[in-house]
Amino acid sequence: MEKYTKERKVGEGTYAEVYVGRDQENGRLIAIKALKVTGFKEGLDMSAIREIKFLQEIRHRNVIELIDVFATVNSISLVLEYLPADLEMLIKDKSLIFKPADVKSWLLMTLRGLHHCHRSFVLHRDLKPNNLLVAPDGQIKLADFGLARAMAVPREAMTPLVVTRWYRAPELCLGARFYTGAIDIWSVGAIFAELMLRTPYLPGEDDAKQAILTFKALGTPTEQTWPGITQLDGYKSLEPSIEKFPAPRRADLQHLFLAASDTALDLLQGMLTLCPSKRLNTKQALKSPYFVELPRATKPEDLPRKAPSAVESEGDSEERKRREEMRQNMINQTRERRMQPQVKSVVN
């Protein structure tokens, strides 16, 4: 605990407070997520345990780094790398211009991070733009693993009450208790659409209307297009009132996503396939021709970004000063070493 300082609070929830701080050993900016142990009736909340567990196990360039964990009397604190912005902030900032190559880069990094989670047998279960954080070098980092869990063994029931509504897969909207990583892929598809539209793609007003809005946009599924859908409790309750919406034509999608290429629309449709067993997985998505056609994905360091905050600027300034001092010391040491043989030859 003595290694870190808290400089300012940047967020607070029911069970946690988040601070920007600094590692006193190297001056690095960090985020400290303090979990309030006293807020739980029976010890630490399971979501907090899962978040610590998975972040300790998952190490990837596109997943937020857990630096340390320490405990105090009333809290357990997660020390995380400090990431100054998230994708939602960029989407809402209309002063930023998104090029097709920028969207491709953000999607590629998101899929790489998610692919690492899935091959590590971890479901994220809450992917949305403000859980995709942006590092100073432009890298996208998957964050907030509070709802994550290990992939279930066959026929192991899980709760459908996961994922923020606008990014929730249709099987979850219909109450499915048996699901796979396809729910995360759906969320990424919805984020992909939002990056192209600069507004949420399927913003349901409430949980009941989310499924209807999804069917209206992508077509009403049937037992033929989605085997087993009629057995879902949510579908049974909605069936009498479900209108039979047609699947969108390619021309309709082209009209909505004006800047999207044919391969981009193919990838979008593959990730937003209603039937989860027919939906693309992360490996298939990453192999899409969309990622190899022109224009190439923008380099992370060249992506649009928010201006740094005051605390970032101060931290960056201190870091530059420290590096310059180290560089100057190295130059001086090198000069001294070069001079030593010359002095010896004169003495001799």
Image (cartoon, rainbow, N blue to C red):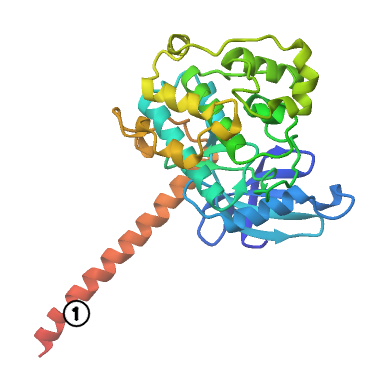
Q: Is residue 113 visible?
A: yes
The percent position of residue 112, horizontal first and vertical second, equals 46, 43
In-image side of 92 versus 210 (left or right): left
284 left or right, relative to 295: right
Instruction: Find residue 281 and report its horizontal and vertical position in percent.
Output: 51, 38
Can residue 131 be seen at all in this image of the molecule? Answer: no
Residue furthest out toward the front:
224
Which residue is under mark 1?
A: 340
Image position of 306 (left or right of 182): left
Q: Residue furthest bottom?
A: 348
Quarter of the C terminus within the rendering: bottom left
The crowd level at tag 1 (other Cα within 10 Å; few <14, some 14-19, many 20+) is: few
- Please tell me whether residue 243 is drawn above or below residue 61 in the rendered image: above
**Secondary structure found at label 1:** helix
Q: How many marks?
A: 1
| Relative to 101, residue 56 above or below | below
Q: Nearer the viewer, residue 271 or 139?
A: 271
Residue located at (77% from left, 54% from top): 75
Residue at image location 74% in from the left, 35% down from the top: 160
Q: Position of residue 201 (x, y in %)?
A: 57, 19
Q: Quadrant of the N terminus?
A: bottom right
Q: Nearer the viewer, residue 37 or 8?
A: 37
Residue 129 at x, y = what percent? 57, 31
Give the camera-side residue of 257 and 173.
173
Q: Residue at x 61, y 19 (%)?
A: 202
Name the image quarter holding residue 232. Answer: top right
Identity, as a three-letter code, of the amino acid under mark 1: Gln
Question: Residue 185 falls in which quadrant of the image?
Answer: top right
